[in-house]
Amino acid sequence: MPFFHLLILALIQGLTEFLPVSSSAHLILLPALTGAEDQGITLDVAVHVGTLLAVILYFRKDVGLALRGALDVLRGNRASDGARLAILLVVATIPVVIAGFILKVTGLADAMRSIVVIGWAMLLFGLVLYWTDQRGGTEKEMRGWSLREAIVLGIWQALALIPGTSRSGATISGARLLGYGREQAARISMLMSIPTIIASGSLLALDVVGQADWEMAKYAGIAAAMAFVAALFALTLMMRLLRSVSFTPYVIYRIVLGVVLLFVAYT
């Protein structure tokens, strides 16, 4: 596989995974609009691993707290802050796992991978992001995250299985409606992405098992490394910008891209 194709794939996944612009939509559009060969499941898993490592590194303190909390839960102690965080992250992941399984076995997941669906989702959920960002509160912080809110955000995250919606965009929208400030909403969204990426990556990895292709493994390692660097850059930049900038620039990008895609699809 050409290095340039690997680079584009890694940059798209890395730069868009945590921005509210839908990484899955961009990965679907890459072969659809350019005529390039579909990257395949192995490389999809690889770039997901790269972005997973990036978010773990960036939020390493929260991740460490959740891991220690998971051990507390196994010991029967559910009262610690870490145990509470671990439980909430698991609860928030359940809706997307259930919905993802249903979409996969029914074939709807493949049926929705079209430019029309992506265009409408990009446009409509971009407007939702703008509305929730303007309407959302700023007073709540992550330490006040409740079980009910974890379920609500889990449902928002499940909506992102529609290509073009954006997992981070959907969960940030939900968190803003619940009263969380921009940074806190993004922090919750990013931590929710960890078990979700692990779950989706594991599902994809099942399709890769048995394909002992060392040449592809080399490409996968390169793609993962580049996706890691790109994701860490995008995540760092977004979290810093949120201290002074709203989500409006992402909304504008989504609306413009959505309109262009719908124009292409219908003409």
Image: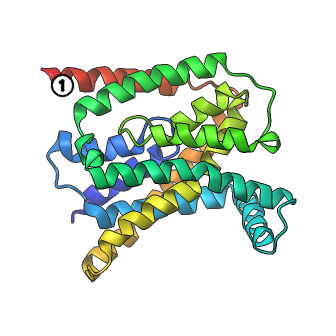
- Pick the residue in front: 103 or 71: 103
Which quarter of the figure is the N terminus placed in? Answer: bottom left
The residue to which callout 1 is attached is 264
Is residue 11 in view? no
In the image shown, does 105 or 252 lie closer to the viewer? 105
Residue 232: x, y in percent?
Answer: 56, 53
Judge whether residue 245 can be spotted in this image: yes
Q: Quadrant of the C terminus?
A: top left
191 vs 201, left or right, is right
For the point 26% across and 79% down, the residue is: 211
Q: Position of residue 27 (x, y in %)?
A: 32, 47
Q: Amino acid at mark 1?
A: Val
Q: Quadrant of residue 131?
A: top right
- What residue is drawn where x is 45% and y is 43%? 16
Residue at horizontal 14 percent and vertical 46 percent from the top: 35
38 up-or-down from 124: above or below: below
Specify the quadrant of the image occupied by residue 227: bottom left
The image quadrant that residue 207 belongs to is bottom left
Q: Residue furthest right?
A: 79
Residue 178 image offset from top left, x and y in percent: 69, 28
- Could you tell me which residue is drawn at 76 percent across and 25 percent down? 138
Query: What colour scheme does the image use?
Result: rainbow
Mark 1 surroundings: few (<14), some (14-19) or many (≥20) residues within 10 A: few
- In the picture, measured across the screen, residue 191 lies left or right of residue 141, that is left
Instruction: Give the SS element for disc 1.
Output: helix
Please state the total of marks drawn on the protein image. 1
Q: Is residue 137 left or right of residue 196?
A: right
Give residue 156's position: percent from left, percent from top: 54, 36
